[in-house]
Amino acid sequence: MKHHDLKLHTSCFQDVVDCVKRAETRYNDRDYAVGDTLTFKEGVSEDGDFIYTGRSVSAKINHINTLGMQEGWMCLSLAKVGILIIKDGEDDA
């Protein structure tokens, strides 16, 4: 199992936090798998840059669907939204 840090636009972020949005469509450039954890870092696009707000939320992938998707794309079903992710070997400093 892996952990993935992902950008998520402010327009979608609160819906993930509130468990209204329970799926995320992503290009599979990270070899996502069921059981992987995700941390969505909220931000907005501004002048070609992604500006982070400082808020983040984590979730676990509990299902992956590729049926009807263009090649390379997948729909990740989210579970346990709000879980705490602790990464080994990282300093808080």
Image (spheres, grey):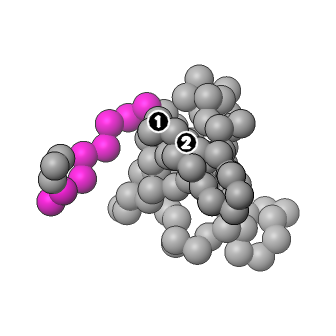
- Which segment did they paint magenta? 82-90
Q: Quadrant of residue 18?
A: top right
Residue 62, can we see it?
no
Residue highlighted by disc 2: 42
Quadrant placement of the N terminus: bottom left
The amino acid sitting under disc 1 is Arg
Mark 1, residues whose alpha carbon is within 10 Å: few (<14), some, or many (≥20)? few
Residue 68 in the image: state x and y as whole percent.
Answer: 84, 63
Compare residues 12 and 73 and report the one nearer the observer.
12
Q: Is residue 51 left or right of residue 75?
A: left
Residue 55 numbered tag: 1
Residue lying at the far front of the rendered structure: 47
- Give the residue displayed 58% in from the left and 44% down from the top: 43
The amino acid sitting under disc 2 is Glu
Q: Quadrant of residue 78?
A: top right
Q: Are marks 2 and 1 in contact (CB under 8 Å)?
A: yes
Residue 50 in the image: state x and y as whole percent.
Answer: 60, 55
Residue 13, can we see it?
yes
Q: Secondary structure at mark 2?
A: strand
Q: Is residue 87 magenta?
A: yes
Residue 36 in the image: state x and y as whole percent.
Answer: 43, 56
Residue 61 position (above or below residue 15)? below
Most prominent secondary structure in the magenta stretch? Answer: loop
CA–CA distance between discs 2 and 1? Answer: 6 Å
Compare residues 9 and 60 and report the one nearer the observer.
9
Q: Is residue 10 left or right of residue 1?
A: right
Compare residues 6 and 19 and report the one nearer the observer.
6
Q: Is residue 6 magenta?
A: no
The answer to which of marks 2 and 1 sits earlier in the sequence is: 2
- Give the residue displayed 50% in from the left and 63% down from the top: 33
